[in-house]
Amino acid sequence: MSRPWTSTDRARCDEIVEGLTRPRPMISAKYLYDERGSRLFEAITRLPEYYVTRVEQSVMQRHAESIVASIGADCVVIEPGAGNCEKARSLCLRLQAREFVGVDISAEHLQEAVQRMSAYMPWLRARAVAGDFTRGMELPSDLPLERRLVFYPGSSIGNFEPDQVVALLSHMRALLGPGANRAGLLIGIDLPKPVHVLQAAYDDAAGITAAFNRNILEHVNRIIGSDFDPAHWKHRAIFNAQHSRVEMHLVALRPQQVRWPGGGRMFATGERIHTENSYKYALGDFVSLLAKAGFQQHRHWCDEQDWFAVIHAW
Ligand code: AVI
């Protein structure tokens, strides 16, 4: 028996159909991450062309002592969109953190990851919370208010529109609780770099990013009951210099009618569906956004090529 239809299901359908029926069709990037999409994204992070994860990790390793000194001891680490908690694991170990709360939409995988963290660091109280931090979510009521650190690595903030970013950063600041005894925000930012590097990172030779992008159509088919055939769509990554962002699109390879219950749409050859933006912020511009969200002070660390910054803001 299928589960009953909820108001969240209805809202997701409405959101997707609204995006698909625009003159310039789009699907929100959050639909890239179903079970298969999340696995493909993990594979992307291991690709030679996808510098993001590797460079961030190298910055964290190389400047570990200084990062730990900046944050200070005895903190409570909160990670929105925690996923497999791999990055939080080494951060908590380095900081000798006292508590960890991972937040993710899918609590099932998170629960397992959090249990592995507890087993690895027996002194750490690690918990999983199911929720979407972009919509506001509740932290456990007994979580200490002091020394809270929000950890948001991977340049995930770059997948939000700039006009949403200040609100999200403010929301992260609110999670830190009141008072001066906050540990702050530790966030990863992908900086502008040569276009050929970006192009390769978002359109890799093995075609993993292409599969990741096309998979959004399978996910949408399951949510709205549409009949997209991913084989009829080509992945395209474009650097938009005006907005300093890499855009992912799906391009129709032939004319096609796509149907879903209650509607549908014709796509002409070459017509595109916009599926993701990945903004590359200049450091100064991002620091201004942090200041607008109430983070008045910061320290940052970069790699030798200035490709990626890890920022501690408070
Ligand atoms: C999750 N996010 C930071 C990735 C990025 O680089 O924007 C998502 C991604 N899209 C294509 N490759 C990776």
Image (cartoon, rainbow, N blue to C red):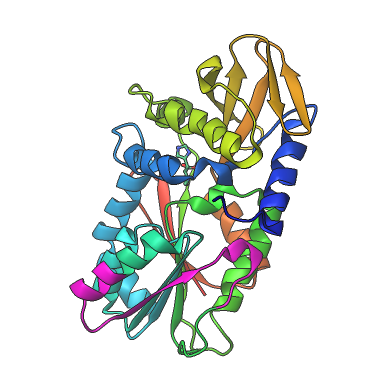
**Position above or below: 300 against 239:** below
Q: Residue at x 71, y 12 (%)?
A: 268
**Residue at the spot 50% in from the left edge and 89% down from the top edge:** 145
Q: Position of residue 87 (x, y in %)?
A: 32, 60
Instruction: Please state if 131 lies on the left or on the right of 14 as rendered.
Output: left
Instruction: Say whether residue 137 is magenta.
Output: yes
Q: Quadrant of residue 31?
A: top right
Q: Is residue 9 or residue 193 the one in the foreground?
A: 9
- Left/right of residue 56 with respect to residue 134 in the rendered view: left
Residue at 61% in and 77% down: 174
Q: Is residue 199 left or right of residue 157?
A: left
Foreground: 64 or 139?
A: 139
- What residue appears at the point 68 percent right and 22 percent down from the top-left corner? 258
- Marks counted in the figure total 0
Give the x, y percent position of residue 289.
Answer: 63, 60
105 or 58, which is in the foreground?
105
Which stretch is magenta? 115-138
The quarter of the displayed image where residue 13 is located = top right
Q: Could you say where residue 235 lies in the image, as x and y percent from the top left?
A: 51, 22
Examine the structure image and report whether residue 146 is included in the region drawn in magenta: no
Q: Quick check: 208 above or below 35?
A: above
Above or below: residue 246 compared with residue 185: above
Can residue 290 be seen at all in this image of the molecule?
no
